[in-house]
Amino acid sequence: MAFQLAVSILIGVLAGKKLDAYFQTEHPYFTALLSILALFAGLYLSLKDLLFPKK
């Protein structure tokens, strides 16, 4: 579960950095936004696996 959460956050951060570089933003807006969204997505997946384990 922890690996799944870490990977989802890492993907969000890397995608945000790519978008910030592509659009040449002054501040890392995309990095912040995508890392927060990835955090929520990772938490959702982790909690779903914890509360409803596969049989």
Image: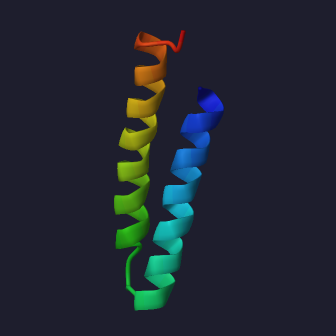
Quadrant occupied by the N terminus: top right
Residue at point 59%, 41% (across, down): 6
Query: What is the x, y in percent for residue 40?
Result: 36, 40
Residue at point 52%, 73% (across, down): 17
Colouring scheme, one of rainbow, by chain, secondary structure, one colour: rainbow
The answer to whether 4 appears left or right of 48 in the picture is right
Quadrant in the picture for residue 24 = bottom left
Residue at point 34%, 61% (across, down): 33
- Looking at the image, the residue that sits furthest to the right is 3
Query: What is the x, y in percent for residue 49?
Result: 48, 20
Q: Is residue 13 visible?
A: yes
Query: What is the x, y in percent for residue 20?
Result: 44, 80
Frontmost residue, 26 versus 31: 31
Residue at point 49%, 58% (across, down): 12
Give the mark count.
Answer: 0
Query: What is the x, y in percent for residue 45?
Result: 44, 32
Quadrant occupied by the C terminus: top right
The answer to whether 45 appears left or right of 18 in the picture is left
Residue 37 higher or lower than 24, as above or below: above
Residue 48 higher or lower than 5, as above or below: above
Quadrant in the picture for residue 34 = bottom left
Frontmost residue, 54 versus 50: 54
Q: Is residue 24 visible?
A: no
- Looking at the image, the residue that sits furthest to the front is 55
Residue 15 higher or lower than 9, as above or below: below
